[in-house]
Image (cartoon, rainbow, N blue to C red):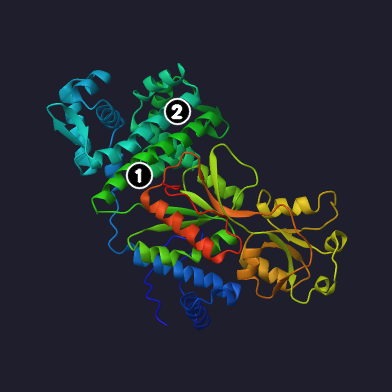
Amino acid sequence: MDTGLSRSHFDVHGEAPCRPSSQRDRTSYQRGAACFQSGRIWRFSPIRLSIAIKVMLASVTEKGEKGLKMVPQGQLEAISFRQLRLFESVGRLESVRRASEDCNLSQPAVTQSLSKLEQLVGAQLVERRASGSYLNASGQLFYRRVARFIGQFEQALAQFGVEGGMAGAKLVSARLLRSQVRVLIAIVEHGSFALAAQSLDLSPATLQRAARDLESNLRKPLFYRGAAGTMLLPDGAELGRRLKLSLQEVDLAAQELAVLQGGATTPIVVGAMPLGGSVLLASMLDDFIAAAPQAQVVVRSESAVEMLKTLRAGDVDFVVGLLPRESAEDLEAIALAHTPYSIVAREGHPLLRQEKVTRDDLGRFDWLVGAVGSSRRDCFDHLFAGHPEVRAPIATSALAMIRPLMIGSDRLTLMTSYELQHEGQGLAAIPFGPIAPVPVIGVTSRANWLPTRLHADFLQMLRDHVDMVMDSPLKPPLAQGAFA
């Protein structure tokens, strides 16, 4: 079977492109592809399932990349903070003259800056009339994101603690250069001055000078000298994270503008929680790419704890999987379906022959549990609260490890009803329950995140898919614009 793959453009984080290297691999590769095309995905072994997911992800991305034209990153980075502030002022005041007074600049300077910005984004943003200067359709689309950028930027400075609160943050923001902020973000992302300089293709001296200039403009320390060299203070790292999120609004502004002009598409970066989240995504991605053939989707998969860190850092747009039990002010969770836990064992396990299973019976066997901080681990801890003698020597959320460890032993584990239904070949539920708390599968995003139209379409299709395949989807369906 010819899969039509030349190379994997679909980035499944932490996985190499799916390329069969032997006859046995090629057979599994073909069967994996066939199981997606035939709709019999859940009847196959975990190895074939894993291969099938990789095949499908690679193929849909190749389809999605055709005709894809992204906004050049260098062109985005050439947009200065001053140009954005002047544009926001013109859009808000509907007058170049009033914007020049608001920003303490001459009218020719404002006009020149606005013209340069329009060149960089490749679109006219403002219509100039005798009565004033007004945003056109492109300008209104661009203005929405720019206003969010300025608000988040100044809020980040205020929360960092610059003098004067929000009023002081507005003054400080006018002193900062994009190059200085880019240096701080690189240091946060890479963890050291040396790696940050390398990532930006700057000399260490140039990077340190920009970092010190930023610190001087903030009039508050960002760094400290330690045994390992100059390091970021925690407040400095948090400022870098928040400024990075604010700058993403500028990227999205330019990308949405390009979409409006028909020249590009906004990428979607999805975080997939282990097990249920990954498989749920894989089961609907082909339909999404068919509906949006120019879309580019990147899937990252990590543990639940690490995935939420990645979400907060702005490295994924949203996360699909079991929702955290505890709410967080900076995150928003949208529930899609209840998916209760069952206690699972291999077929033929001794407990399956008992009419009634007690907690003491469960405690006699070793357990396979989720990582600390995961919903699966929290449920296990709740189930055996006050029973520290229960053995759980292995913790993992990797399906490729869970099934072999279960099939070849008398271990017990927790699986959701969805996971057992679709991935439970050779496994069976122990007659014990109900088990509390009942987990919910859904979407987690940053609380102030504003999705693009393509993001909203993706999330609505995900909800529709859940309504179709889940036993207990949460009703009513999303309101119109719930993700917009």
The residue that disc 2 covers is 155
Residue 249 sits above or below residue 165 on the image:
below
Q: Position of residue 472 (x, y in %)?
A: 61, 60
The residue that disc 1 covers is 252
Q: Is residue 92 left or right of residue 313?
A: left
Report crowding for label 2: few under 14, some 14 to 19, many 20 or more residues within 10 A (C-alpha): some
Which residue lies at the image location 65% right of the left edge and 51% below the top edge?
374
Which residue lies at the image location 43% right of the left edge and 67% below the top edge?
286
Disc 2 residue type (three-letter): Gln
Mark nearer the N terminus (1 vs 2): 2
Residue toward you, 23 or 374: 374
Residue 90 sits above or below residue 332 on the image:
above
Quadrant of residue 331 within the rendered picture: top right
Disc 1 residue type (three-letter): Leu
Question: Residue at the left extreme?
Answer: 130
Residue toward you, 276 or 409: 276
